[in-house]
Image (cartoon, rainbow, N blue to C red):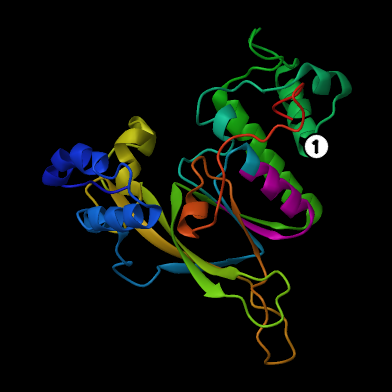
Amino acid sequence: MSKINQLSLMKLPQYLFSLKGRSIASIALSLITLLSAINPAFSAPPRSPDKEETCDILVAGGGLAGAATAYEGLLAGRTVCITEITDWVGGQISAQGTSALDERETQRSLLFYPRGYLELRRRIKEHYGRLNPGGCWVSYSCFMPYDGHKILFEMLQDAASRGKGTLKWFPNTVIKELGITPAVAGNAVGGQQIKSAIAIGHKPATNTPPINNEPLSQTIEDAYRYQNSARFNKTIIRFIPKPPNQSTRQPKPVDWYVVDATETGELIALADVPYRLGIDPRSPLEPSS
């Protein structure tokens, strides 16, 4: 999310072209060299975190997937922290402005949906008096983006109340770094574990307009920088799991869930988790199953 200096930008096309035919290891080393030209937005925090937050479940990204995760966690009585780069929950149905529910006809005919999604549909219909107030042709349910945020956020608050969970909502906040430690002895899962996450919250600086006055493309680089700017005042937040109730001094695995629900898989990249792109078909007759 940093700017490459002007000289690097001029050299970038020929530099990337020169990577053709080289080994993966060689390419990786070359890209590391290229990243040395990037401004220090990837540097360590300029100060200690301004505050620390504990949770059972940390959800990065407040879109529909993140909201669904939080909904179930809150009903289960957990403390859920949600970070979201915008100030709305819902992603596609709110901040992205495409507030139309994507549904397959077969699923819709059977109402074969998770309970949270069924609740969302019910509340939309209750709010407007019908499921498709806009008479939209691309979906059986289209509505105003702001109402998508409002209805979904109220659902999360009600889930916390019903399940005796705790919702910690961090709008205009992005995860910048992960603290990763090797798995301790006795961890049957194996591999490494995320022990902390450093996030940056941003708010408009004094005498500047509200955040939503500009498109995200104009502010996203600033949002990922630790330093205050003419546009934003930053708060550095450290997320950690709740301290375990342990009677012994033996080390135990980190006791929390960290869920990457961002639009671009940011935590997957930060944690260097292997991944694949695309959809694996289960049947040639239903390639998206």
Q: How many marks are shown on the rendered structure?
A: 1
The image position of residue 212, as x and y in percent, is: 38, 33
Taking 57 as reference, is 76 left or right? right
> What residue is drawn where x is 63% and y is 11%?
138
Q: Is residue 75 magenta?
A: yes
In the rendered image, which quarter is residue 288 located in? top right
The image position of residue 186, as x and y in percent, is: 72, 81
Q: Nearer the viewer, residue 239 or 24?
A: 24
Task: State which region is magenta.
Answer: 66-82
The image position of residue 80, as x and y in percent, is: 65, 57
Taking 117 as reference, is 232 left or right? left
Looking at the picture, does residue 192 appear above or below residue 154? below
Looking at the picture, does residue 131 appear above or below residue 191? above
Q: Residue furthest left?
A: 7
Q: Nearer the viewer, residue 271 or 201?
A: 271
Q: Is residue 228 visible?
A: no
> What residue is drawn where x is 55% and y is 22%?
98
Q: Label 1 amino acid? A: Pro
Q: Quadrant of the C terminus?
A: top right
Q: Residue furthest bottom?
A: 249
Q: Nearer the viewer, residue 20 or 6?
A: 20
Q: Which residue is mark 1?
A: 114
The image position of residue 165, as x and y in percent, is: 73, 58
Taking 251 as reference, is 275 left or right? left
Q: Circle 1 sits in a helix, a strand or a loop, which is it? A: loop
Q: Is residue 240 magenta?
A: no
Estimate how packed mark 1 is, as few (under 14), some (14 to 19) or many (20 or more) residues with alpha carbons within 10 Å: few
